[in-house]
Amino acid sequence: MASFSTTHKEKLRWIFHGSQGLRAGWSILIFAALLAPAVFIANIVMRHLPSLREGEIALGDSLIFEAVQLVAILGAMAITAWIEGRDVWSYYGLAGRRPIAKLLFGLGGGFVCLSLVVMALNAGGYLVFDGRALQGLPALGYGLFWLLDFMMVGIREEALFRGYLQTTLTRGIGFWPAAILLSLLFGAGHLPNAGESVPGIIGVMVHALFYCLLLRLSGSLWLAIGFHAAWDWAQSYLYGTPQSGHMMQGHLFITHTRGDVLMSGGGAGPEGSLLGLPAQAIGLFVFLWAVKRAGLFLTGWDGRELLHKAQ
């Protein structure tokens, strides 16, 4: 009887636990259960912030909504990590070596890469600058608060997709299968956005894979967080272009697209432009080279030291 009980317990343990702790599927189910009430609350909040549903997105509405989502996701990650006996910061890529340097490099890289795309569109006549919408203190204030907003966007989306989900699925199916699956889901999540396009969705998925590569090479989310935040900030605030089908209130420059939507990006913004792809590719490769030269990758280009193992 004792032997049967021991065998039974071992089988049950095998169902729930593998060599790296709680199996990925169970971990994701726990995380989803913790996040479900927060998603319900976020939807209620969204109904009271009309600019998030139609028209240009107001800064105040976006700050409230992003803060609610960020707290919910980080909270669910922290509780799940506690249940599994893991360190939420190091295990999911929010700690590590030189996080400030990685964040600053990411911010610079995202700004430069998006600016290269905008310059290419402007030189080709597909994006026209009409002047400035803001001057003086309003320009500074909107610039700083939109940067805060997009920092929350960067932390939220990277912590969810390239932090928790990528790390957890890697335990079950391996790094690159998880990266491809999650990048497809990341792109699919942008499909409901009004003004989004097929090239824009492809661009979103390419960026998602690029952020996975940054995680692979650096073992940290901070390069991707900075790049993500600065790309969105430059696109939405600085140059006043659509971003994944959305326009933001309080942007610095006034611009409009002209000509073929496939070349200009149309409602998807510069990231949805076919003309901008070469400039974007050059910017991404130069960014990788600069980060490697700065010594912010773990072991060069192979990323063998990818993720912290559970203690």
Image (cartoon, rainbow, N blue to C red):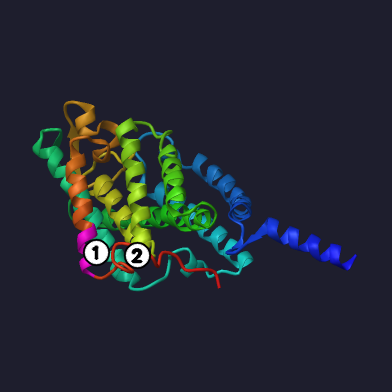
Residue found at the far front of this picture: 3
Residue located 43% across and 66% down the image: 94
Residue annotated with mark 1: 291
**Mainly helix, strand or loop, the magenta region?**
helix
Point out the tag, 1 or 2, that comes first from the N-terminus. 2
Horizontal and vertical percent position of residue 175: 44, 54
The answer to whether residue 268 is above or below residue 70 is above
On the question of residue 146 being in view, the answer is: no
Residue annotated with mark 2: 218
Q: Is residue 242 magenta?
A: no
Asked if the residues shown at circle 1 and circle 2 are in contact, with their CB atoms under 8 angstroms apart, the answer is yes
Classify mark 1: helix, strand or loop. Answer: helix
Residue located 33% across and 69% down the image: 298
Q: Give the left or right position of residue 89, taking residue 267 as reference.
A: right
- Tell me the crowding category of disc 2: few under 14, some 14 to 19, or many 20 or more residues within 10 angstroms, Cα based: many
Classify mark 2: helix, strand or loop. Answer: helix
Task: Please identify the quarter of the rendering in which residue 147 is found.
Answer: bottom left
Q: Nearer the viewer, residue 75 or 106?
A: 106
